[in-house]
Image: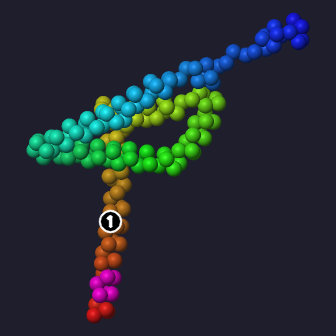
Amino acid sequence: MKYGSSAFYLSRVRTPNPLQSGAGMLPYFIIYPVWLVVAVVYPAAVTVHYLLEVQKGKGKNEATAAAVKQWVFYWFLFAATSTAYTFVGWALDIVFGVLSVFVGDIQGEVILLLSVALVNPWKPMLQTAFTKANDGLGPLEKAIEGYRAKAGEAIQQALKKAQ
């Protein structure tokens, strides 16, 4: 092979790694509808189901009330993460951009897997997250109650001095 020939250059061309080229990743037109069903449609249907049970009067037991609280917590998380992504999404884009050099463009797949894990009806991570958040609020509620009591006393003393 001659140095300047096209055969020389073609022999030097490397075949791309399918993991690095992103060829093995799911296309966005498949990821987005699946994510939409998993993260929006299914939780909306479950939330409406439990709210209708409460409205019909069947939801007076603790399990239904806890399920309604859990799915309201999900919608709060959904809104909070959507809003946070607006402001700090660039940081995730940087992380997944660096990962795309080594693994491929997996941002959509990771978000889809997190969504599936969160709303999975057989092993719900949402219930675990809700329980941990609810348990973690106990000390916070006590601290807020203490500050509220101190503020109330300070306001009453200020009103007595003002009279």
Q: Is residue 65 left or right of residue 15?
A: left
The answer to whether residue 66 of the structure is visible from this angle is yes
Q: Position of residue 3 (x, y in %)?
A: 89, 11
Residue drawn at x 32%, y 59% is 138
Closer-to-camera residue (144/81): 81
Magenta stretch: residue 158 in it?
yes
Residue 128 left/right relative to 9: left
Q: Is residue 15 above or below residue 144?
A: above
Q: Quadrant of the N terminus?
A: top right
Q: Is residue 56 left or right of residue 90?
A: left
Indicate the amino acid at tag 1: Lys
Residue 48 image position (x, y, % from top left): 22, 39
Closest to the observer, 113 or 31: 31
For the record, the magenta segment spans: 154-159
Badge 1, how many Cα within 10 Å: few under 14, some, many 20+? Answer: few
Horizontal relation, residue 154 to residue 53: left or right: right
Q: Main secondary structure of the magenta part?
A: helix
Query: What residue do we see at 32% from left, 72% from top?
Result: 148
The residue located at (53%, 23%) in the rendering is 25
Q: Is residue 47 above or below residue 157?
A: above
Q: Residue at x 10, y 42 (%)?
A: 56
**Which one is in front, 101 or 134?**
101
Res 117 visible: no
Name the quarter where the C terminus is drawn.
Answer: bottom left
Residue 75 drawn above or below residue 38 = below
Q: How many marks?
A: 1
Q: Position of residue 33 (x, y in %)?
A: 40, 28
Color style of the picture: rainbow
Q: Which residue is mark 1?
A: 142
Under tag 1, what secondary structure?
helix
